[in-house]
Image: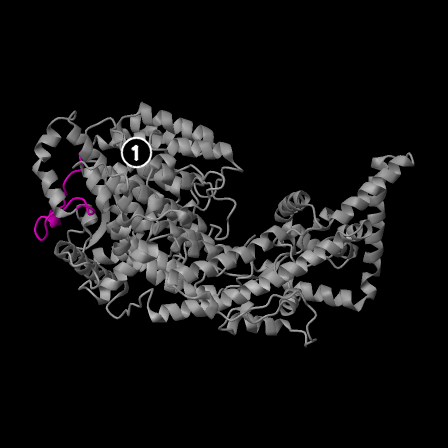
Amino acid sequence: MASSGDVLNARFNKALNLPLYYRCDELSKIFEEFSSKDLQLVLPHLLENIFGLTNQTGWGLRTVYHNSQPQEFEILFRFLQPTGPMFKLCYKLLTECYVKYEFPLTYLPQKVRKLIEDGMVPPFYVDKLQIDPQTRVPTSLVLNSFEFYIFHFAYHLVNPWLQRAMDHGTWSLWETPYSHLSEEYLIHFLPCDGSTVPPYAGSYVHPKSSLPLQTTSRPVRSPTLFPQSVILKQNSTSSSLHSSPTLPQQSSMVEIWRSETVIQVFIDFWLSFGERQTSVFGAPTRDILPSIQHIRVVRNLIKHLHYFANSILGDMSAMDELKRIILLSSQAKMYGFLRHTIHHWPLDSSFRLILETWLSYIQPWRYVDWRHRNMRPFPGRENEERVRTIDHRWINFIAENLLSYTVIFRQLLPRFKRLELATPKNSHMLFRITKVFSQPNLNNMLMEVERCLDDVSVQGLPNDSNLSQEASHQGHKWNAMVRQQVLELEGPGFQYKPMFGPDTISEVFQFMILIQRANETAHNLLIHLETEARKQSSGFFSSLVSFFSSYPSEMDEYSLDDRRKVSDYLETSLHQLSGIFDIDLSRLPCMSYTSSYELPQTSTPTSSTVQQREVTSTTPITSRLSVQDWRDRKRHIKYEGDPDLEPIRSTENAFLVRLLYQITSKLNETYALEMYHLYDHSGILGYVSRQILSPPMVTRKYDKSKAGFSPQVEVILPPRLSLRSLASHRTIVYNMLGMLLSWMLGYGVSTYLLGIVFLWFIFVLVKAVFEPFFATSRQNVQNVGNANQSFLSDNSF
């Protein structure tokens, strides 16, 4: 008769091979039917299968999207939510205090791992270390079931094996089970509505370390986020807390160790992108930049921490103490993450996400009332955050995070000088920054804190002795606080430059001149586009020609409405910068807007000239180029990527483009080798195939996962089928007219379609017959043969 362990292993392995819905249902039954003693060996294999620790993708927590796979999304979310079967298993295993699991140190963030290896163990990890008794070297962490799951979940977002499979440029597809689960875990374990963490069945209390090597050299410490006074206060009451599971104090202790574990692990793993990770066991090195999904998760973490810290009740509970110190304890990692990511992020439209993440961190006053977190501004009150005066009580937060305001602002100035500010996306990013810093009283508080760095005697205050002494004490406090920040966050050699000092004001003034020039360019460009639009819609014949024209407009990326907003954004940014830094706008050079585009004829810029302008110039493009130069640049820039992935033109049907691409992608993936052999055939099949299939080609794209300047990499496309030309408006209209004419003549639509296919086949056959007589065709075949050899050498097949 088979033992319960054998039955469990058989059912468990069988469940992992089932489809997702049946897999989760069967695992839930297994968790309920078997005892914790039998289930203790299941957890490591289950987490390995869910999160895919090596080169797998696991269950797809970061690749299943709500809008495309809603059923799979809901199944994964329900299974892994804080009240779902997975956490019930973790809590069930907590009843066995001896059940521990090893988490390799190699999976920890590099800075944490280095501290442990150097003997400077962070307090949170002291009682979790597994040390080799012979070498006296730490080898792993020993965790309970709850901690073991949280560590795996946090590591999943930064796993270098999975970073290669994640798309760094995905904007529209971001609602994954992972992002929603991370938010749900924060809401559950860090409640912002004054409630406590819901208890679980059992009376598990976080134990002290029992490791033999920790009893001799250093004392065992508990939570890393709490000051020593709170730890001593809680230890003094530990006997009463642990004696009765019904006491409210025990509930407080239980909620604290889970809450602190979640937030400490999330902060350590998710904010660890300060330096490149070293390769471990052949694993790929971690990208120097996080993925877009990673940035979204961090931004949600920042918002929740603000709500959590702003929900203090004023009692003496451990949860309230955690709320008081949570932001201060995570300040260094948050600043390092933002500073590093802003420095290395490429200057494209995705930069807006890291920018908004920074703006969320430096505006805690926006995240005060948890009940209103999902409410949008009422109509006509969208600009309320700019009008509302910031209360002076936030000055302590500003002083504690001064570098996050001033140093990062100065870091952004040269980056924005390299942007083409005349475009809608870039001008809106600039507007967002100036809008935040122009909030009433913010610059006054920043200046007040900065003034304490140079003048701690607080001159100019009233003669009231008590007020003067209080302000002097506060000034000395902020002076010491900011100097300690600079030393810890930037190092002893860093030279702090005040945000409102003469150097910064001079930089801002030069930047305002560039904004003014960009505004002139945007204004003139808008006049030109509106003139062209009026010409195209001036009559029926012009509209018809424009509709059937196969040449798309040069301004397909932005609409006229978007272009009209650019001048408003730039004008508002100028006035806001003027108010923030007290710069008189009359000092700016006068700019005269003109609608004339007929400039003296100059030599046409070549592509190499354009590239040189973009890469080697130290001043922004918009500050030097006239509208005519801008149009010339636009005309001579060529798309060098996959033709089927080129942005959809205004002369194409978007639905058909996407549908035909999905169809051809599936066919090209399934019959890639067959298409290659047919295309390379020397007989009549090869002649015909070369008329139907698109030839191999070398495409180029920019690798934006690298730091600094994005290098251009080559990608070889094999012979493939492309049907994108069928999605053009002109082809659609011609076919509709043909079908209408065929129907009117009594032949029917099916006859028309068969006739079109027959004529197309005859046309292809004639071209194939005459191909050997054209030297250019023979030369093309030789050229693509070389490309095909490169294609076959790839290991994709």
Q: Height in image: 712 above or below 373? A: below
- Quarter of the view holding residue 478: bottom left
Point out the stretch of residues depicted in magenta.
205-226
Residue 64 % position (x, y)? 48, 40
Q: Secondary structure at mark 1?
A: loop
Residue situated in front as seen by the camera: 716 or 312: 312
Say whether residue 206 is magenta.
yes
Residue 619: x and y, percent?
A: 50, 72
Examine the rendering and report whether any part of residue 678 can be seen. Answer: yes
Disc 1 marks a residue whose amino acid type is Asp
Residue at x 45% of width, y 32% of height: 74
Q: Is residue 206 left or right of residue 651?
A: left
For this orientation, the residue located farthest to the right is 745
**313 and 652: which is toward the camera:** 313
Q: From the viewer's perspective, is 319 left or right of 173?
A: left
Location of residue 274 in the rendering, given as x and y in whole percent from the top left corner: 33, 59
> In the figure, residue 603 lies in which quadrant?
bottom right
Answer with left or right where residue 547 lies relative to residue 55: right
The residue carrying pointer 1 sits among few (fewer than 14), some (14 to 19) or many (20 or more) residues within 10 Å by Cα, namely some
Which residue is most to the front? 463
Name the magenta segment's main secondary structure.
loop
Residue at mark 1 = 193
Q: Quadrant of the N terminus?
A: top left
Seen from the viewer's position, the closer of residues 363 and 17 is: 363
Number of dots carrying numbers: 1
Residue depicted at 16% across the width and 59% down the height? 463
The answer to whether residue 711 shows anywhere in this view is no
Q: Nearer the viewer, residue 472 or 539?
A: 472
Question: Image height check: is 706 above or below 219?
Answer: below
Residue 274, above or below 179: below
Residue 123: say if magenta: no
